[in-house]
Amino acid sequence: MFRGHAHEVIAGIVGELRGLRSQLNISDGQRTQIQEVVKSHKPAIAAQLEKGRDARRAMRDVVEAHGPDSAETSKVADAVADSARTRALLVAKISSEVSPILSSEQREQVKATRGRIEDSVDELIAKFGE
């Protein structure tokens, strides 16, 4: 039951993001500016993706070799957490650079969509607890 609900929530989030993209009506100038922001962070994005992938693979391998409660597993779990922290900070940095490019109405649309997505995730978490 939870699995079906999770799939439904994920599909809803994807739908929200697709809808947001079309609702924002990004101008060509805005699109160019946003692309430049993303390009300026391309090396950091690539490094973070690689770091995250490597940390997840290491976690899998160490759990298989030493079990979930080992000191080795705790150490690689810290690397997974560090990767998540780095990713969150990078997303925040990029978002803070993109936000001024958007109009106030576009920022409100982004905020509203983020709120709906967070509500969906909260529902999923509540459903998991049942």
Image (cartoon, helix red, strand yellow):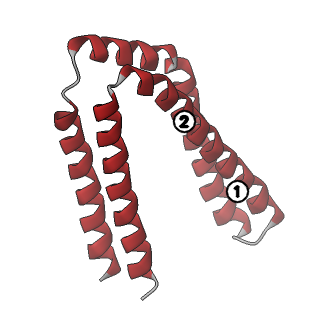
126, 23: nearer the viewer:
23
30, 68: nearer the viewer:
30
Q: Cβ–Cβ below 8 Å for labels 2 and 1?
A: no
Q: Report x, y in % for residue 16.
A: 24, 50
Residue farthest toward the front in the current orientation of the protein = 104
Q: Residue at x 37, y 45 (%)?
A: 111
Is 7 on the left or on the right of 77, as rendered?
Answer: left
Is residue 107 visible from the viewing direction of this image? yes
Position of the N terminus, as image quadrant, is bottom left
Residue farthest toward the right in the current orientation of the protein = 71
Q: Identify the amino acid type marked 1.
A: Ala
Position of the C terminus, as image quadrant, is bottom left
Say which residue label 2 marks.
92
Q: Report x, y in % for residue 62.
A: 69, 58
110, 53: nearer the viewer:
110
Q: Residue at x 44, y 74 (%)?
A: 125
Is 126 on the left or on the right of 65, as rendered?
Answer: left
* Mark nearer the viewer, 2 or 1: 2
Q: Report x, y in % for residue 19.
A: 18, 43
Q: Residue at x 32, y 49 (%)?
A: 112
Q: Residue at x 37, y 64 (%)?
A: 119
Is 105 on the left or on the right of 58, as rendered?
Answer: left
Above or below residue 117? Residue 39 is above
Q: Identify the amino acid type marked 2.
A: Ala
Q: Answer with mark 2 or mark 1, whichever residue precedes in sequence.
A: 1
Q: Which mark is residue 17?
A: none
82, 50: nearer the viewer:
82
The quarter of the displayed image where residue 85 is located: top right
Label 1: few (<14), some or many (≥20) within 10 Å?
many
Is residue 49 visible from the viewing direction of this image? no
Label 2: few (<14), some or many (≥20) within 10 Å?
few
Say which residue label 1 marks.
77
